[in-house]
Image (tube, grey):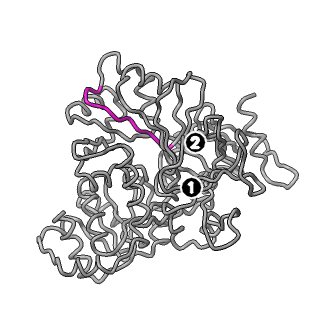
Amino acid sequence: MDAGKQVATRLIGLQISGKPVAVYMSKSKEAIISFLGINYSGNFYVPLDVKSPPSRVNSILQVLESDIVITDTDHYEQLQEFCTKEIVEIEDLIQNGKIDEAAIQSVIEKKIDTDPIYSIFTSGSTGTPKGVVISHRGVIDYIDWAVRTFKIDETTIIGNQAPFYFDNSTLDIYLMYATGATLVIIPDDLYIFPAKLIDHLNENKVNFVFWVPFVLINVANLNIFASKKPEYLRDVFFAGEVMPNKHLNYWRKHLPDCRYANLYGPTEITVDCTYYIVEREFSDEESLPIGFPCRNSDILILTEKGEVATVKEQGELCVRGSSLALGYYNDWEKTRQAFTQNPLNKHYPELIYHTGDLVYTNERGEIIYVGRKDSQIKHNGYRIELGEIETAVLGTQLVDLCCVVYDFKNKQIVLFYVAKADLVLGDFRKLMLTFVPKYMLPTRMIKINSMPVNANGKINRLQLSKSLNE
């Protein structure tokens, strides 16, 4: 905490207040110190992915119009090569040890709960990432719900998997703040070797994880529990994409005493708005419910007519409550499109967020996720706009026309393209990585002679998607 106050003291001295401060460093203790110091100084933090192409990082910085970027010694030279903002090293911010308690307290007293606490940038359909601005109120509400619902306390040892630029990390970080729980930052390379990952969990006595399903699926597919098991694990939570019951049943079979919880929610509603504690049995083919609304979050399942969907009738999941984001930073148009007046309330202003996810309630009252209603997907836990990938593909100048669809059955990003010559995989991937992160690369590429169009003259994405299963 003292290190965070040292960072705050320096930022206050630089007269930076109420602004976004970008943090460009790997997942680390120093990154969390930066976040804490930025909040203490009356600003809000914006985690950046050090593995993203410089062009993408720069596009985020342009949207932010921030004054400085905080980094560490390991990434200073890397950032300096392309960043025109003032760069400050975290080591420099904390080395003098000065803390101005009076200045920090003065700043804190002026803050209110609707002020921003952080902004996380998600993929944008036009090629420009969107900065979701989350308030202190949203995080406080979410963490208070999580602590009470799941009885988290100082004995909890959290095994962090989510990158800090991914909103799942909010639960890990703020549970630590709220309860005094221990946060173990697991090295990213261990997720490639599940056996070593289990060893790491045991060495650190990790008893709580909140991971993307991809990691749990990988452990199940490799049958790791046949040789070793996490000895201390008692809570296995997951979110970010659909968790197949086939793989969850493997975990439940080998670790029957663990508590399993499926959490759901987009970044725009402060991480999660529904949850489902898995207590009954499911066959491998069944869909796992996303459950019920979190406390103080109201879920509206609306039809295309803006009416409440009946049982088993599909509709778009919309959310109202304190958890809603403040909007998209420096993007009023997208904010107005996603956050609209509640059509069920004709009497006073009340915003709801349109998730773009299709769901329905079953006869048990459980919410069942169906899929996306637009081109945004969740792949390996990341929210991705397919349009951003298409923009990057065209930016390579290697194709004449392209369309990117998602193969939900095989969990693949599929690129259909029209070009004079076949794409050379190695050269294409190398060039694409200058535009988008690795997790956004197409996993399958299909060359076609011409792009199908519908009656409106638009690319017929549905026809292309259907062709994958023919």
- What is the crowding at mark 2: few (fewer than 14 residues within 10 Å), some, or many (at least 20)? many
- What is the crowding at mark 1: few (fewer than 14 residues within 10 Å), some, or many (at least 20)? some
- Secondary-structure class at tag 1: strand
- The front one of 133 and 369 is 369
Residue of label 2: 442
| First along the sequence among labels 2 and 1 | 1
Give how far apart the Cα atoms at labels 2 and 1 are. Answer: 36 Å
Residue type of the residue flagged with mark 1: Asp
Quarter of the rendering containing residue 136: bottom left
Q: Is 231 one of the magenta-colored residues?
A: yes
Residue type of the residue flagged with mark 2: Pro
- The front one of 87 and 210 is 210
465 horizontally vs 293: left or right: right
> How far across and how far down the image is residue 133, in percent?
47, 66
- Secondary-structure class at tag 2: loop
- Which residue does the image show at 34% across and 39% down from the upper left? 209
- Which residue does the image show at 40% across and 65% down from the upper left? 118
Residue of label 1: 298
Instruction: Tell me if I can see residue 216 in this picture.
Output: yes
> How far across and how far down the image is residue 168, in percent?
42, 49
- The span picked out in magenta is 230-240
Residue extending farthest to the right is 455
